Image (tube, grey):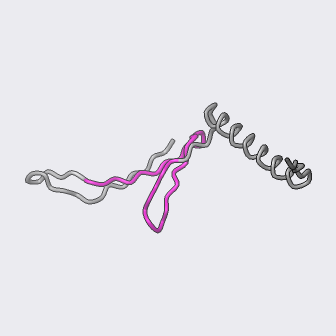
Amino acid sequence: MIINCIFSEPVEIATDNWEYSAINCTGTDPTSTTALILNADTGAEFYLDKKINYGDVLILVFLLSFFIFCIFKVVSDFFIPRRVTKF
């Protein structure tokens, strides 16, 4: 893995003693499971995980089953109308 860092915004903390207040690093790792997403307009950034864990699978199964049930319910109510009983 190669990491390239650029130090910027030097700050003098004492006479002839400098520190940098900002650092920007980029790296190349083909086995990395995360990706950095950066918005060029606002500067917002977040990391996206490239793998799915059991919690993600559980949420997806729940949402998909709810979605399929709702579609089935709407389609069945449309094609098979309920009988109206009079008292």
Is residue 67 in the magenta section?
no
Q: Residue at x 69, y 42 (%)?
A: 63
Question: What number of labels is visible?
Answer: 0
Of residue 68 and residue 32, the one placed in the foreground of this image is: 68
**Image coordinates for residue 42, horizontal then vertical, percent:** 44, 65
Q: Does 21 sit left or right of 58 as displayed?
A: left
Name the residue nearer the viewer: 58 or 84: 84
Bounds of the magenta segment: 21-47
Name which residue lies at 46% across and 68% down.
Answer: 41
Residue furthest out toward the top: 54
Answer with left or right where residue 16 lies relative to residue 80.
Answer: left
Foreground of the two, 32 or 61: 61
Quadrant hosting residue 22: bottom left
Q: Residue at x 81, y 47 (%)?
A: 73
Nearest to the observer: residue 60 or residue 12: 60
Residue found at the far left of this picture: 15
Left or right of 42: which side holds 87? right
Tell me if residue 46 is in the magenta stretch.
yes
Q: Residue furthest bottom?
A: 41
Residue positioned 87% across, 49% down in the render:
86
In the depicted structure, whether residue 57 falls above or below residue 40: above
Q: Where's residue 37, x and y in %?
A: 52, 55
Q: Tell me if residue 15 comes above or below residue 59 in the rendering.
A: below
